[in-house]
Image: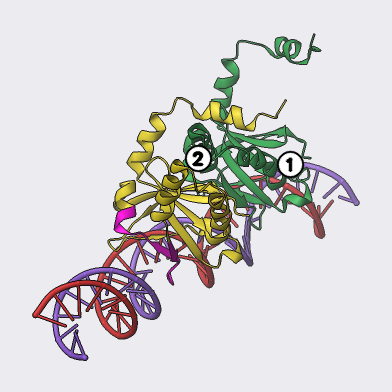
Chain colours: A yellow, B green, C red, D purple
Amino acid sequence: MSSFKGRFTYSVDNKGRVALPAKLRKSVSTTANESFIVLRGFERCLYIYPQDEWNKLEESIRGLTFSDAQHRFFSRTLLGWATDCQLDSQQRIMLSQEHMEYAGIKNEVLILGVLERIELWDPAIYLEYEKNQPATYETVVERVLKPSP
Amino acid sequence: MSSFKGRFTYSVDNKGRVALPAKLRKSVSTTANESFIVLRGFERCLYIYPQDEWNKLEESIRGLTFSDAQHRFFSRTLLGWATDCQLDSQQRIMLSQEHMEYAGIKNEVLILGVLERIELWDPAIYLEYEKNQPATYETVVERVLKPSP
DNA sequence: ACACGGGTGGGGAAAAGTGGGGAATTAGGG
DNA sequence: CCCTAATTCCCCACTTTTCCCCACCCGTGT
């Protein structure tokens, strides 16, 4: 089970390549086999799942009822924009033009480790996103880390 | 279960390294495996959790639902500012530039043991914090330790 | 006095991040 | 079917950061 964490600002070269931070690479389980799935995330970012974590997600999508129109739309969008990719010999992934456009990523990218997935953001967009949140860091910590009653 | 206690003033060298006090190290359980997680804490300080204590917190983060927008913000914020680190061969941890800036730490640090976690403060900021408390030690005791009605 | 444990500092090897050239593969059009 | 253009990907090279190791200092207890 992955447990990505941390925050990194990396550059995207003009071929669309992004190095995967070494600290995150250490958290990738060996069963993932250097294989990743990139897809549209929520809130204008990209999600990257290692193969093994993706498989779990895929199972829950299979569980959606085929007969529900919204479910069909959801799985079409999710899977339609999902591409799998391998790391190159320098441990980088290559982003497609479409994915970069979706997330507004140009030549800098904010990389977040969020347990089972990695997120890629345009730094400015993330700042904007953060600013629009009603909750502050402290309320977050309080809610999440407070020992349950 | 850890039970850190005590107060230490240590130096931070120009590489951002801080020695973990020997007294605190003795309270780290062996299952933590010399692995720690550093994150932003309340009131401009840093929290350090040994791996095993952190795992308990991580469980509650995993409990957050993927589909709730606020939960997504929570896990991004909390995990984004968390980095794990190992002790080096001199039993030191290395602080990132961002963490030091958040806590205002320069070349001296106040280290507090607070049961399951260790806190790092800039000495001056802690003094300020202490001074701004409306309550005294005694009135706090009264409020905190009074048996609940 | 001296060994020992604990805190502090720095040099250097190794790893990580960044960028680009060029061969191999693929796609498309005549 | 072949030629050309574009894309992919492998490899090399350079810079920066990380981390391993050694050395020192200073109390304390023997």
Compared to A65, does C28 lie above or below? Answer: below
Residue type, label 1: Leu
Residue B106 visible in the picture:
no
On the image, numbered disc 2 is attached to which residue? B76
Give the image location of residue D22, x and y in percent.
Answer: 63, 66
Q: Where residue A35 sits: x, y (%)?
A: 50, 65
Closest to the camera, between mark 2 and mark 1, is: 2
**Around disc 2, counting alpha carbons within 10 Å, would you say few (fewer than 14), some (14 to 19), or many (20 or more)?**
many
Q: Position of residue C16 (x, y in %)?
A: 48, 62
Look at the image and give the residue range highlighted in magenta: A84-99
Q: Quadrant of the C terminus of chain A?
A: top right
Query: Residue B25 or B29: which is nearer the viewer?
Result: B29
Tell me which residue sits at (48%, 26%) in the image: A135
The earlier-in-sequence mark between 2 and 1 is 1
Q: Residue at x 39, y 55 (%)?
A: A80
- For label 1, the residue is B24
Residue at 57 percent across and 28 percent down: it is: B42
Direction from residue A43 to residue B130 in the image, left or right: right
Residue in the foreground of this view, choosing between A14 and A37: A37
> Which chain does tag 1 point to?
B
Front residue (pair B94, A145) = A145
Quarter of image, res C21: bottom left
Q: Is residue A15 above or below residue A62?
A: below
Query: Does residue B45 lie above or below A30 as drawn?
Result: above
Image quarter (top left, top right, bottom left or bottom right) of the N terminus of chain A:
bottom right
Q: How many marks?
A: 2
The answer, for residue A29, to whether it is visible in the render is: yes
Residue type at mark 2 is Arg
Gap between marks 2 and 1 measured at Cα: 30 Å
Closest to the observer, B106 or A91:
A91
